[in-house]
Amino acid sequence: ETGVTQTPRHLVMGMTNKKSLKCEQHLGHNAMYWYKQSAKKPLELMVVYSLEERVENNSVPSRFSPECPNSSHLFLHLHTLQPEDSALYLCASSQDAGGSYNEQFFGPGTRLTVL
Amino acid sequence: DQQVKQNSPSLSVQEGRISILNCDYTNSMFDYFLWYKKYPAEGPTFLISISSIKDKNEDGRFTVFLNKSAKHLSLHIVPSQPGDSAVYFCAANGGSQGNLIFGKGTKLSVKP
């Protein structure tokens, strides 16, 4: 595997379910990100991890629980979601979190539908 | 309020002609700008970037121009090819922990 991979690619869940999104990067990067893309809206940054430490204080609803056990893996644990949480969830990584000249590399995304 | 704006949701261009995608931003502290390309069912892929110390960066058929006084950048693709048909996102480095601020995207269709 190369680049950034995400599983599952598609997920349908009820509001009472608990599920997890997984991201893995094979680029040797130190920073990982979760973005949310809703219809007709810009990509919205949810969380940033640098060397497994959360470094961005975006207000993410508590029904989303990010986890970064090591610099190659990132999870987004989901529980009691709402239909408006249906979106494309994109994972990205970059060499480092700080600094200006930091291209981010994206995974293919997980299309989440909450019924 | 959106800090990065792509005011054209879509653009249609004939093959072989020039495609010009525009992006405006509001924060003069942004110092690095990127363009990403996204095909359906795939994540965005990095295309080209420009630092605020430059006004032009060229890579093959792709050129990005930056006008700092107008807080405007544009992506030129010439000649356009049908394979360029995709959604193009403009992004600015927000400075804080390297997070990127994205525009809503412009869907480019290149017709044969």
Image (cartoon, rainbow, N blue to C red):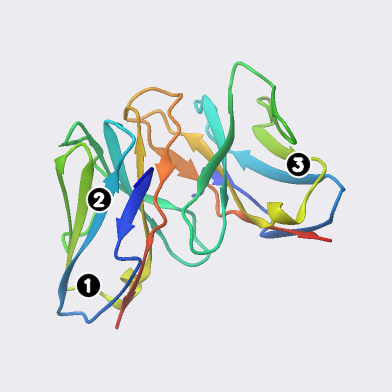
Q: Are marks 2 and 1 on the same chain?
A: yes
In which quadrant will I find the C terminus of chain B? bottom right
Specify the quadrant of the image occupied by residue A93. top left
Marks 2/3: CA distance?
A: 37 Å
Q: Chain of mark 3?
A: B
Both marks 1 and 3 on one chain: no
Q: Amino acid at mark 1?
A: Leu
Task: Name the kind of residue labelled 3 in the image.
Answer: Ile
Q: Which residue is mark 1?
A: A81
Q: CA distance from mark 2 to mark 1?
A: 16 Å
Query: How far across and down, in percent of the image, does residue A71 sit?
Result: 20, 36
Front residue of A56 and B1:
A56
Q: Nearer the viewer, mark 2 or mark 1?
A: 1
Residue in the image at 76% along x and 41% along y: B77
B102 with respect to B59 (left or right): left
Where residue B12 appears, x then y in whole percent?
Answer: 79, 60
Q: Is B34 left or right of A38, judged from the image as shown?
A: right
Crowding at mark 1 (Cα within 10 Å: few <14, some 14-19, many 20+)? many
Q: Disc number at residue A59?
A: 2
| Distance CA(mark 1)–CA(mark 3) | 41 Å
Q: Which residue matches tag 3?
A: B77
Q: Nearer the viewer, residue B31 or B3?
A: B31
> Label 2 is placed on what type of residue?
Ser
Asked where in the image residue B98 lies, by quadrant, the reply is top left
Q: Position of residue A32 (x, y in %)?
A: 29, 40
Query: Is B38 in front, or is B30?
Result: B38
